Image (cartoon, grey):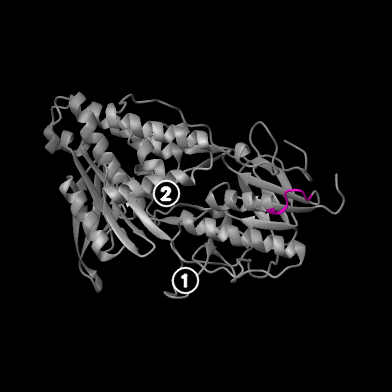
Amino acid sequence: MVKNRKRIVILGGGYGGVECTRKLEKYFKNDEEVEIVLVSEDNFLLFTPMLPQVAAGMLATRHIVMPIRTILKKTTFYEGRVKNIDPYGKIVNLWGTKEKRGISLHYDFLVVSLGSETNFFGMSDVEKHSYTMKNLNDAMTVRNRIIDILEQAENETNPILKKSLLNLVIVGGGFAGIETAGEIMDFLLDARKFYPNIKEDEIKVTVLEALPNILPGFSEKLAKFAHNLLTRNGIDIKLKTAVTSFDGNEIRMKKIKNNSDEDDFEEEAIQTKTMIWTAGVTPVNTIKRSMFKTERGKIIINDFLEVQDFPGVFAVGDCALFIDPETQKPFPPTAQLAEAQAKIASYNLYSLIRNKDKKKFEYQSRGQMAIIGKRNGVASFFGMNISGIWAWALWRNVYISKIPKWDKRLRVLLDWTIDLFFDRDISRLKFVDKETSKEYKVLDEVDDVW
C-alpha cells in the first residue's frame, strides 16, 4: 500500500455521485497516491427519467439500471447504507446487515451526494396508503397495482366499487407526476382490450396539483399545451388542490379558491383505491441528523460547493442547498443540476490536492423536457420552446445519449421499437419485500473488510 495515500470518499450512487467519481477517475487515472471510494445503497445507477415507462410496461426493469462496477475502473466500491458521518474524525459509518458487520471508512476528502427521499409533509396516513415513484421497486409495484385493479374491476359487479378501482390519482403536477400520468393512461387504454367488461369511459386518471399550473419551470405556453393535451387524452387535472388525507379509500383535499389567500378554500373528496404520490422530495434523514449546518434540511455550501466549516468536504445534488442568484431561491432538484455540480466538485477536489485554484459553481440550465403520452412532449431547449412529436423525439434522443453503457442504450431502443408493434405485457409479477436491515456492531477499521 502506498504511504500517505489520500482517500476521497463519495457517498451516493446517483447521478451526482457517479458523475463525480467518473471525473475523479480521469483526473487521477495514473496517480497511485489517490484512492477513490464510492458508497451506494444499490450496486447500480438508476436512470430515473424512465421510471414511468417501466411502470407502464414499456421498458424492462433491467434496461434502465447500469451496474456501477461496470462504469467505474479505478474506484473501490462499497454497497451499503450510510449510518452517520463524523466530519471531525473524518469517518463515515455504514450500517451492517445480518450477514456482515458494519463498516467504518476513514477519509481525507468527502463528497456527499445522498440525494433525497419522498416528502409526505407529515401526513402519515398518506405515507402509509399511497404509492410512490422514486425507485425501481416503486415502478414495479405501481405496474403490478395497475394490472391488479384491472383484474379486480373486470369481474366487479358493484358499480361504485368498480368506479373507485378504475379511478387512479397522481398527486403532483411536476415532471414525475405528469409523465407518470401520461404513461399510465396509455397503459390502461392499451391493456383494456383484454378486459371486455371495462369500458374506456370507466377508466379515469386524475392529477392533483397545489400550484396554479402544472410543470413549473416551463413557459406558460408550454405548460398550457401540456395541460390541454393531457385533458384531451382523458386525464383530469385539478389545479390549486392540496391533499389533506388519504385512508386507502378516499382522498380528502382542499381546493384553494383565491390565488392570494390559501385560507379561502373548500373541501373536496375523491373515492379511489390507488393514489400515487409524486408531490415533493426532502433530503434523507442521514443529512438531517448530521453535524453539518443545514437549512430546509439541506447542507449549506459555499460558491465552491464546499461544506461550511469543513474544508475538503463537498455536497452536491438534492442534499445540497445552492441558491439561484437570480431568483434567490434554491435550484430545483434535477439530475442536470447534480451532474453540473459533480463536475465542479471533482475539479475542486483535484485543485485542492494539486494546489491549484478552485472554480466557483455557476449554473445555466440547458433546458427542460417532459413526455406527456404517446409521441407527444414539451421541451424548452436553449431558449427554444418545442411541443408535440418533435419534443417527444428530442426527449428520447437526449436521454438515451445520457445512458453510459452502449448495451443498455440498445436494449432501451429495442424496447421502444417493440412497443410500436406489439401489445404490452399484462402479467402481474408477484414479489416479496426483503426484511428490514438491522444494526450490527461496527468494526474499528475496515479498509479491506467485506
Q: Position of residue 6 (x, y in %)?
A: 78, 54
Pointer 2 residue: 398
Quarter the N terminus occupies: top right
Front: mark 1 or 2: 2
Element on which disc 1 rests: loop
Residue 441 forms part of the magenta stretch: no
Viewer-proximal residue, 114 or 37? 37
- Mark 2 closeness class: few <14, some 14–19, many ≥20 residues within 10 Å: few
Residue placed at 49% from the left, 35% from the top? Answer: 408
Task: Tell me the number on the disc at residue 324.
Answer: 1
Q: Quadrant of residue 135?
A: top left
Residue placed at 48% from the left, 47% from the top? Answer: 402
* Residue kind at label 2, given as amino acid type: Val
Viewer-proximal residue, 131 or 357? 357
Tell me the magenta residue range: 27-31
Viewer-proximal residue, 316 or 389? 389
Q: Quadrant of residue 139?
A: top left
The answer to whether any part of residue 289 appears in the image is no
| Residue 95 in the image: above or below residue 291 | above
* Residue kind at label 1, given as amino acid type: Asp
Q: Position of residue 320 (x, y in %)?
A: 54, 62
- The chief SS type of the magenta part is loop
Q: Position of residue 376 (x, y in %)?
A: 26, 47
User: What's the CA distance linking mark 1 and mark 2?
Assistant: 25 Å
